[in-house]
Amino acid sequence: MRYAALAACCLVLLAVPGAARDRNQVPAATPIGPARNCVPLAQLRDSLVRSDRVIDFRASGRDRYYRVTLPQSCPGLESERRFSYATLLSQLCAQDIITVLYQGGGPMRGAGCGLAPFQPVTIAHAR
């Protein structure tokens, strides 16, 4: 009985890193048209942080996404998976800056990172 519990515990410990790795994999994306410098905010439903460099913005409509591959790694983006932005326009543009938001006793501001062009894509196994 004791060995069965120990074996089950080890299986769980071995499975966790693989599950975390799967969650952090950037899904393949196929470009569908030219990249855009700006996208109207009204078209964006939510964002999916894939890594410290890749954000997929889900657009209005069925399975429509814009992939933004940041020019440089944005520290903390992948681990926190949340960011803010400020714009005076009704659109989000490649020149805009996002700010990583850390959770811990209330939201705290982290690194500021420049965006990049918004590439329309289809995403393999989009969720």
Image (cartoon, helix red, strand yellow):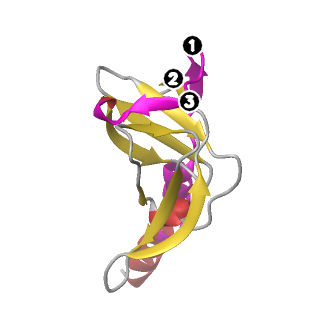
Q: Residue at x 56, y 30 (%)?
A: 37
Q: Report the quarter where the N terminus lies.
A: bottom left
| Residue 98 % position (x, y) | 50, 56
Q: Amino acid at mark 2?
A: Pro
Q: Residue at x 36, y 23 (%)?
A: 63
* Label 2 environment density (alpha carbons within 10 Å; few <14, some 14–19, many ≥20): many
Q: Amino acid at mark 3?
A: Asn
User: What segment is highlighted magenta in the picture?
Assistant: 13-42
Q: Amino acid at mark 1?
A: Gly
* Label 1 environment density (alpha carbons within 10 Å; few <14, some 14–19, many ≥20): few
Task: Answer whether residue 16 is visible to the viewer in this image.
Answer: no
User: Toward the viewer: 124 or 99?
Assistant: 99
Task: Answer whether residue 51 is visible to the viewer in this image.
Answer: yes
User: Toward the viewer: 114 or 68?
Assistant: 114
**Magenta region includes residue 36:** yes
Say how many tags the image has.
3
